[in-house]
Amino acid sequence: MSDRPSSFDYEALLACGRGEMYGHGNAQLPAPPMLMMDRITLITKDGGAFNKGYIEAELDITPEQWFFACHFLGDPVMPGCLGLDAMWQLVGFFLGWSGHPGRGRALGVGDVKFTGQVTPAIKKVTYKIDMKRVMAGKLIMGIGDGSVYADDKLIYSASGLRVGLFDAKDLV
């Protein structure tokens, strides 16, 4: 894995969303507007709190982002579920980056805490994922703990983020 990049710009994330990064039928990120990051600033196969891998990504916030127009009228805030989805996106990306085949699907989360919010006044959201475990037998599954920061202030945390990779025939 030493030949794999340790960071990805927006164009690379879009290529992943088109299925061009890991091959047809393998891990993909969603396309905009559901792509919840602008760049992955660091991804490592070890490191992190459990020395099983680490991912850090960022999303630049502007008042024009689509979710502010509808959530909520007169009280714009990024839905917490989008931050949670971003963390699942990153766990799935880690599995593809690690060389595992299959299409990613979120499988669950243990515990989620929201202690802040993303408003149009925020400039940058940072996601941090500490991988806890990667199972690569009949089932391919990544488990990680994640944090979301708004302008460097912790606003969400999630433990036990689970993402699996599946063959397309198994998703019918």
Image (cartoon, grey):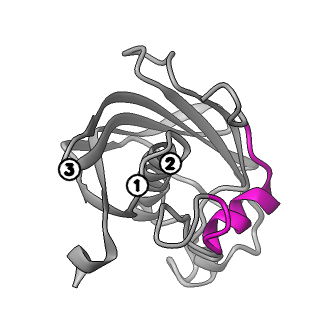
Circles 1 and 3 in contact, beta carbons < 8 Å: no
Q: Which secondary structure, mark 3?
A: loop
Quadrant of the drawing holding the C terminus: bottom left
**Against 169, is 97 above or below?**
above
Q: Camera-side residue: 109 or 6? A: 6
Q: Amino acid at mark 2?
A: Leu
Residue under numbered circle 3 = 139
Residue 39 located left or right of residue 77: right
Give the tally of numbered discs: 3
Q: Residues within 10 Å of mark 2 (few under 14, many from 20)?
A: many
Q: Amino acid at mark 3?
A: Leu
Q: In the rendered image, which quarter is residue 13 located in?
A: bottom right
Percent from the top left, x then y, of residue 51?
A: 42, 14
The magenta-colored residue range is 7-21
Q: Residues within 10 Å of mark 3 (few under 14, many from 20)?
A: few
Residue under numbered circle 1 = 84
Marks 1 and 3, Cα distance to the nearest angstrom? 23 Å
Residue at 50% across, 50% down? 96
Q: Of tags 1 and 2, which is closer to the observer?
A: 2
**Against 32, is 94 above or below?**
above
Residue under numbered circle 2 = 90
